[in-house]
Image: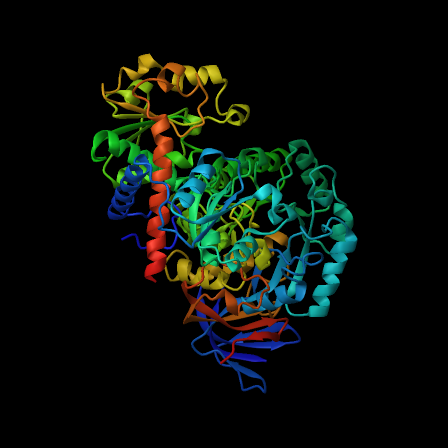
Amino acid sequence: MLKRKDLLGLIDVSKDELSEILDVAAHMKAKLKAGDKCLSELKGKTATILFYENSTRTRTSFELAAKYLGAQVVNIAAGTSSVAKGETLVDTGKTLDAQLNDFLIMRHPMGGAHYLLSKVVNASVLNAGDGMNEHPTQALLDMLTMTESFGNLQGLKVAILGDIKHSRVAKSNLFGLRTMGAEVYMYAPETLIPKGIDRLGAKLCKTKEEALQDADVVMGLRIQLERQQAGNFPSLSEYAHFYGVSANDLKLAKPHAIVMHPGPVNRGVELTGKVIDHDQSRIEEQVFSGIAVRMAALKLLNDYRNSK
Amino acid sequence: MIIRNGNVVLKNSVEKKDILIQDGKIVQIADKLPKGDNEIDASGLHIFPGLIDMHVHLREPGFEHKEDIESGAKAAVKGGFTQICCMPNTYPVADNKVVVSYIKNRAKEVGLCKIHPIGAITKGEKGEQLAEIGEMKAAGAVAISDDGVSVNNSRLMYLAMEYAKGFDIKCLCHCEDKNLVDGGVVNEGLSSTIAGLKGIPRAAEDIMIARDIALAESLDMPVHICHVSTHSGVRLIRDAKRAGVKVTAETCPHYFAATDNIVRTFDTFTKVNPPIREEVDKQAILEGLKDGTLDCIVTDHAPHHTNDKNVEYNLAAFGISGIETSLGFAVTYLYKAGVLTLPQIAEKMSAAPARILGLDGGEIAEGAVADLTVVDLEKEWIVDPATFVSKGKNNPFKGWKLNGAVAYTIVDGEVKYQQEK
């Protein structure tokens, strides 16, 4: 059983724990597919969603996941809360704790913010993305989607292309996939590869071909326009040319390979429209998986809370 | 006063001697002095020339919630320091004779250790216009520095150093290329990647070290490089010294004892500028201390209030409160580890800073000022910031085991700190 108060990242989550979350998520997904959206695992529990960054899919995904499990959900946009009046994260956390929240689901632009929050609250903290650090539920939904396609993650070749350096998605995926025995190949402009990532088990590629050759999974990462303005690469078109994936590039991957992207996609930059709409694309399936893994994470953290 | 039977750390040796002190001076050093009325039994203890920390932040005026001159001085003598030099990044900035005089006067009122103000290079440390360097020197500033930032404009820095030359006052250079730092908070490397925190490349420090060496060479004048943290910075300074450039340099305990692995827990007490770097840097710093490339050890004591640190890593203030642990780190990680001898530690923590800034002190000799630090080298203790007398409890080494505790701190022949029995 998952034995932790918080889900802050996948860096220290074991293979058994990951397997359990994915198993429960698969079970949740089956229920949702059967049209069962009125579950009761979190009945009587409260979850507050605190987002210090804009988001549509992750925020609604968490909200629906908690609601499908029967929890009461409160949404706070940091821009309209006391945060805008200068309250510190620690004080905000203590306030939310005093309101008897069971779960705090937070997105924050700064790495490690969740570690700070988790230390000062009794509520379980779920990381919905912290700066360049981690985005554990995104990696879990990616892993669930891959598991559904291939049955197992062991030995899969996962090629991740794009802005690795600023990507919490790439890092959580690297941690989770390596733990589960998959191979993670990364390809990006040199300016967007974080130092030492290879020492964490990533295989850095010199060419797009090397990354895509015989890949089971091809994952694009969103590139933020401001990275170009900050001088990380000269133009979106050059970026698309060298680091984007076209239908032609996709032929290098295995015939059954799937295409993924955490979204939102810049069409024609990370992936061409043809690739996004390809029948091997799992981008919409990822969104569905997102609800299931978040339900699983909430349920398992709740089981642990109840066991104490 | 007689300090009897201590192991006296002299320039090139350690000898068991008695020391006679009168009127604030060392009058006699002998094998066996006749009995006096005021004696300190230093059997089993080591007597260092009074330690000098030429790089601290006392926060007064303006940030007394972090530290003030009195709490800082108390922390200093507890750490074994008889003289400290405080950086000008107060509020208002010590960029004029009024603030410099204020600090001198407060130090005199407090009266624990000698406190020497360092004036700013530029007004408000803004890097735009020269501060009144001559006036500050006349008021008692022992050096100038814009510590906390570099003077980015090389032309202005060139002129500042050239102007300072006329007043025979030294520039202490904080080396940091702000554009390259670009909001980074930890060393760029495996640890910054693991933590997802923005990294600061070594080059951000090295570029400014190289620039300031170039300015000094061009002007044929001395320059001092603050808190060196990179292996490449050590090499730049070593090469410059070999070429005859008059460069001196300092480093801090957190750079010779720790690596950036400690940032991975997001402990904001580990956030310091320049950042704690990697094993290769730590080893180079140790080598630099050993071969003389790095002249002295300073603390860069940077006390902060809990409100400045109990926030997200990116938002936390830079700095470590280190004046009460510095000697312990030197004894444990330099002397006990076989990197430096005791006379070499006395050189790095007393003689060299005195020489670089022209301060009275730095040696144990007949006729010298009676500033002495008496140390129990064998005493083992565990760092607990809660017990600091500094207002700043921001020290990331809680729980670390250190050797070397200060038994007495003696300033001008008076005991200003005595360890509780």
- Left or right of residue B406: residue A299: left
Q: Is residue A182 left or right of residue B285?
A: left
Which residue is depicted at the point 33% across and 17% down? A278
Give above or below for B240 relative to B47: above
| Relative vertical location of residue B335 with respect to residue A198 in this rendering, above or below | below
Residue B240 drawn at (x, y percent) = 51, 38
Residue drawn at x 63%, y 61% is: B67
Colour scheme: rainbow
Q: Position of residue B319 (x, y in %)?
A: 55, 52
**Residue B367 picture quarter:** bottom right
In this rendering, does residue A226 appear at all? yes
Query: Front-most of B360 and A56?
Result: A56
Figure label count:
0
Residue A175, image quadrant: top left
Q: Give whichever of B60, B293 is nearer the camera.
A: B60
Residue A254: give x, y in percent of width and height.
23, 20
Q: Residue at x 64, y 33 (%)?
A: B154
The reply to whether residue A200 is visible in this rendering is no
Q: Along the line of sight, which residue is nearer the eye, B88 or A238?
A: A238
Q: Is residue B178 left or right of residue A34?
A: right
Relative to residue B371, is residue A177 depicted above or below? Answer: above
**Along the line of sight, which residue is nearer the eye, B144 or A23?**
A23
Residue B305 on image: x %, y %: 60, 59
- Residue located 60% across and 41% down the image: A79
Where the N terminus of chain B falls, by quadrant? bottom right
